Image (cartoon, rainbow, N blue to C red):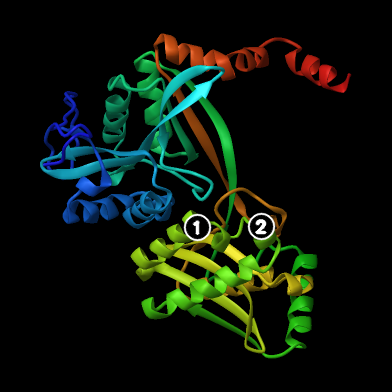
């Protein structure tokens, strides 16, 4: 039996119907990842398959690696159960924050700077299960604020959270975070379809100049035994440039490195590490996860000494061609837009932060301390013009 964080059996009384797989009364448990059985973790993966645009960043390998590496003080899973099977799951953490001296209890998505997308997982995206999870969170009475970061536009997690919060009297706030680029791949069109003529010309020119330095090779490492060495090549490339100097390279951050080490170990079946080399020396590498027919670009790095040849763009071009050969239908760049991503004429997927403030003194205070006055000011006639004038004085 899955038990609540305090060790007691946990269930939620709402008589909602899950429809599949058992069609019984939904029950909710607050638990930890360590309490899940092996079959429950397998079920986690099955749930993730119903949310393919988010799956690589919220499935069991990702979240379990995240928990082990970043060691959140109080990680918690809220799960919905029907007929003994997990039909809904959300990975969160309890944190305490101080806002202008007010001590707040916050339930936060299991995200940080290495997290580019987040979602609740439910069987076939069922809205009733999503709402059931949100009811359990809001009714628990344990938090002044529930904050979920980087939820993609169109996700039922957003719609269900807003609906339930408003029904229960919670104040809601939705803020944009990432505008994530992604590019469609197709076998029926040239791989560079839609790219600007100048950009394509630059790619060809840099390709020729790079080839003048020696034989250019490209490989995509897929076997579990070779991934470890390929990941070390990526680490070395990334740390050789400005990220290494600033200490932001993966290899310079112990917890971040542990996260990617663990992730590659846990998800080796769907991790790909492309490497571009000149005369046998790596000049660019990426870390990808494959889910369905989409490639997700987790990380990219290149040799700063070869920056004039744009090795990061050249390897991306090869990754796209590789993806098309493998039957892939999209490359998701993840995180926010950047000029080098925009060169690929991508489409964009907006992401949002959802904040829910409890209908309590602490919850209402938290809202007004940080957001209330600003949100009200936006609705006042001339407020935007006044703010701009004040900044200019």
Q: Quadrant of residue 301?
A: bottom right
Tell me: 73 left or right of 135. Answer: right
Where's the N terminus, which quadrant? top left
Q: Quadrant of residue 129?
A: top left
Q: Nearer the viewer, residue 92 or 216?
A: 92
Considering only order in the chain, which callout, 2 or 1, is on the residue closer to the N terminus?
1
Q: Tell me residue 355's x, y (percent).
A: 47, 26
Q: Tell me residue 357's x, y (percent).
A: 44, 19
The answer to whether residue 292 is seen in the rendering is no
The answer to whether residue 265 is seen in the rendering is yes
Q: Tell me residue 190's x, y (percent).
A: 62, 72
Tell me: 382 left or right of 134. Answer: right
At a point 22% along the width and 37% down the height, the residue shown is: 80
Question: Is residue 207 placed above or below 38 in the rendered structure?
Answer: below
Q: Quadrant of residue 60?
A: bottom left
Q: Tell me residue 145's x, y (percent).
A: 43, 23
Q: Are marks 1 and 2 in contact (CB under 8 Å)?
A: no
Residue 273: mark in rendering:
none
Q: Secondary structure at mark 2?
A: helix
Q: Secondary structure at mark 1?
A: helix
At a point 44% along the width and 75% down the height, the residue shown is: 227
For the residues marked 1 and 2, what is the alpha-carbon distance in whole angstroms? Answer: 28 Å
At a point 46% along the width and 43% down the height, the residue shown is: 111
Q: Nearer the viewer, residue 59 or 101?
A: 101
Q: Nearer the viewer, residue 266 or 126?
A: 266
Question: Is residue 365 placed above or below 236 in the rendered structure?
Answer: above
Can you identify the residue that label 1 sits on? 254
Residue 341: mark in rendering:
2
Nearer to us: label 1 or label 2 = 1
């Amino acid at each position: 039996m899955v038990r609540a964080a305090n060790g007691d059996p946990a269930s939620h009384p709402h008589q909602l119907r899950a429809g599949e797989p058992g069609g019984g009364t939904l029950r909710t448990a607050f638990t930890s990842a360590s309490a899940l059985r092996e079959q429950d973790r397998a079920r986690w993966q099955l749930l993730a398959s119903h949310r393919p645009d988010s799956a690589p960043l919220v499935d069991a390998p990702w979240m379990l690696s995240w928990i082990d590496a970043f060691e959140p003080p109080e990680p918690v899973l809220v799960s919905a159960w029907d007929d003994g099977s997990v039909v809904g799951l959300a990975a969160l953490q309890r944190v305490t924050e101080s806002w202008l001296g007010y001590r707040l209890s916050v339930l936060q998505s299991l995200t940080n700077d290495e997290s580019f997308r987040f979602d609740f997982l439910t069987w076939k995206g069922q809205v009733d299960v999503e709402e059931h999870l949100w009811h359990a969170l809001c009714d628990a009475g344990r938090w002044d604020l529930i904050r979920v970061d980087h939820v993609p536009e169109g996700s039922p997690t957003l719609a269900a959270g807003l609906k339930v919060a408003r029904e229960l009297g919670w104040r809601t706030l939705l803020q944009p975070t990432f505008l994530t680029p992604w590019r469609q791949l197709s076998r029926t069109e040239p791989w560079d379809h839609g790219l600007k003529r100048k950009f394509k010309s630059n790619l060809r020119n840099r390709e020729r100049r790079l080839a003048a330095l020696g034989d250019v090779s490209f490989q995509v490492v897929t076997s579990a035994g070779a991934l470890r060495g390929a990941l070390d090549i990526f680490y070395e490339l990334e740390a050789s440039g400005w990220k290494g100097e600033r200490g932001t390279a993966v290899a310079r951050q112990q917890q971040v490195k542990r996260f990617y080490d663990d992730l590659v170990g846990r998800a080796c079946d769907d991790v790909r590490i492309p490497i571009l080399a000149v005369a046998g020396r790596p000049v660019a590498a990426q870390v990808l996860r494959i889910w369905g027919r989409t490639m997700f670009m987790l990380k990219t790095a290149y040799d700063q000494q070869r920056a004039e040849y744009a090795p990061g763009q050249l390897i991306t071009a090869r990754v796209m061609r590789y993806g098309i050969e493998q039957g892939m239908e999209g490359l998701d760049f993840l995180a926010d837009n950047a000029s080098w991503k925009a060169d690929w004429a991508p489409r964009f997927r907006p992401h949002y932060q959802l904040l829910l403030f409890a209908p309590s003194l602490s919850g209402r205070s938290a809202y007004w301390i940080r957001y209330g006055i600003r949100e009200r000011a936006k609705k006042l006639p001339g407020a935007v013009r006044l703010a701009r004038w004040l900044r200019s004085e």
